[in-house]
Image: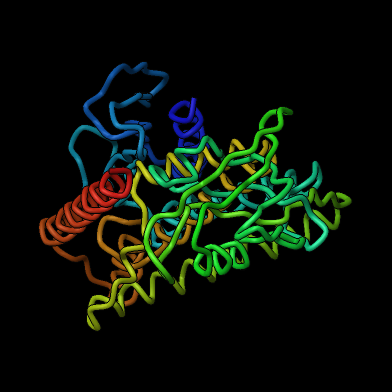
Amino acid sequence: MTIIIFILVLLVTVIVHEWGHFFIARKSGMTVEEFGFGIPPRLFSWKRGDTLYSINLLPIGGFVKIAGENGIEGNFPIERQFESKPWYLKSAVLIAGVVMNILLAVVLFTAAYSIGMPVTSDHGTPTVVSVVSGSPSAQSGLAVGDTITSVTVGGTILAAPIATDTLHTAVMKSTGSITVSYNHLGTSHTVDIVPTGNGGSRIIGLAIEPVVNERLSLPSAFIAAIQQTYSIGTQIFSTLASLIAGIFHHNDTASGLVGPVGLAQEVGSAASIGFTYLLAFTAAISVNLAVINIMPFPALDGGRLVVVLLEAITRRKFSQNTVGIIHAIGFLLLLGLMVFLTVGDVRRLL
């Protein structure tokens, strides 16, 4: 089920992004050769009008192929090709995907806050928000979404509100097992968890936060959605800046990043907490997709936008071969990063 939800979340965020490119390209008089979900090889496809719609094997991305985006082609009218259009129309096509992802995030956050959004509060119900795979907590049967009724450490019941920080502090000071009473799908359970490690390094692999559903009026939900979208966007920019700085200072910022496998786990956890939390998590992924794509890196929308703007400023065309090679290298680097993150995800699972 987690895999299905993961694919659906990617389908929504990627299709919305690519539809932005598709819509503006068509409105600008460009021919869209293919609208694809996933990374080839192609599984199946159908054609409607001038556009081929395809579903590809790896469901971790998507693309819109526009005639003339890599230079004038001979098999399409010149006036319907990307390269023949003025810089502002090219720019509009390139940023359309990012704009659509931001709009999607605002819509999803608004819906989540309107329905009732799980948020942390001192008056909330202690809820499992994360369980480390293979940890003592995971082996005991605890799962994301379970509500905690009591935690006993060293014969002392932890005072409310029970949260991750207080739990971890108590675990590190303890010498025996940890008793956790909780509700799972309406059924009460009590388990004894034996932490791994010794002394200050004792861990149980469990994160708990006091959660309450916060429901807002539609206008308030819309304002909260804009604030949340902006907040997540700035956090992502900050993380990316730290990551780039880490390359030169050799820190381990990248160790906290996740790839497709880790993201699938996070989506599954979000779905376990509740539908509105899954909506909010999908919105956050959409913001991530927007921010990453607008970065001025080869093969991304931001990198292509830089080329268009430089050509407009200098009033000269760059060599299509050179630009193509740069974008190809950028794509290979991104693919390498994806493999690196996936290997890290698998190692954490093991």
With respect to residue 186, does 319 lie above or below?
below
Place of residue 12 in the rendered image (x, y in percent of width and height, measured from the top left): 52, 36
Q: Residue furthest bottom?
A: 249
| Quarter in which the C terminus is drawn | top left
Picture residue at 43% right of the left edge, 29% below the top: 3
Place residue 240 in its image quadrant.
Answer: bottom left
Closest to the observer, 74 or 343: 343
Place of residue 281 in the rendered image (x, y in percent of width and height, measured from the top left): 58, 47
With respect to residue 6, does 116 lie above or below?
below
Place of residue 44 in the rendered image (x, y in percent of width and height, measured from the top left): 31, 16
Closest to the observer, 167 or 6: 167
**Residue 6 appears anywhere in the view:** yes
Picture residue at 65% right of the left edge, 39% below the top: 146
With respect to residue 185, does 62 lie above or below?
below
With respect to residue 226, does 77 lie above or below?
above
Q: Is residue 46 left or right of residue 273?
A: left
Q: Is residue 145 left or right of residue 293?
A: right
Closest to the observer, 196 or 222: 196
Place of residue 317 in the rendered image (x, y in percent of width and height, measured from the top left): 21, 65
Q: Is residue 21 left or right of residue 229?
A: left
Tally of numbered discs: 0
Rendering colour mode: rainbow
**Residue 25 appears anywhere in the view:** no
Picture residue at 65% right of the left edge, 58% below the top: 155
Picture residue at 77% right of the left edge, 61% below the top: 160
Closest to the observer, 264 or 304: 264
Q: Is residue 100 left or right of residue 258?
A: right
